[in-house]
Amino acid sequence: MRDFSLTPKPLSTPERPHPEIFQGGNSTAARWMAGRVSDWYFSNGKDFDGVVEQIADVPKSAPEVGRRAPKIGLNGFLIAYFGRRVLPPVRELEAQLPDGERPDGELHHGELPDGELPDGEPESAPAHA
């Protein structure tokens, strides 16, 4: 970059000469780059086996440039709706939708049609809140 300034300047210390570099990305190239240049790698949206694969892949390229492997962070997801209890996994819900659609004809990943929850409980809030 040229003709760029950042104010206030990041605080440098002998132990940390620059701010930590955070990175995400699921591609092979992103994993390789994270090992070479990043201080933190964040996995996002992977199942257990995918996360295990990333944890094994990311550190492999660090020794090539004399670095320690980056720290690894994980994002977790919970599917819930206002006024409803937590619903079963998304794939189970999609199987219950007529033709994979909501009554308005638009597919919304993991939502149930208006009416009742899978076990027959009435909804306590509109599905489209």
Image: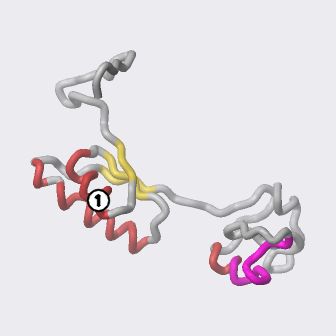
Q: Which of 28 and 60 is in front in this view?
A: 28
Instruction: Identify the residue at horizontal 15%, vertical 47% (top origin).
Output: 67
Instruction: Identify the residue at horizontal 88%, vertical 62% (top origin).
Output: 124
Type of the residue with mark 1:
Ala
- Against 39, residue 11 (above or below) is above
Left/right of residue 11 with respect to residue 94 in the rendered view: left
Q: Quadrant of the N terminus?
A: top left
Instruction: Identify the residue at horizontal 26%, vertical 65% (top origin).
Output: 57
For residue 2, what is the image quadrant?
top left
Q: How crowded is mark 1: few (under 14 residues within 10 Å), some or many (20 or more)?
A: few
Q: Mark 1 points at which residue?
A: 29
Q: Which of 80 and 100 is in front in this view?
A: 100
| Residue stretch rendered in magenta on the structure | 94-103
Q: Is residue 82 magenta?
A: no
Residue 64: image location, x then y, percent:
11, 54
For residue 80, what is the image quadrant?
bottom right
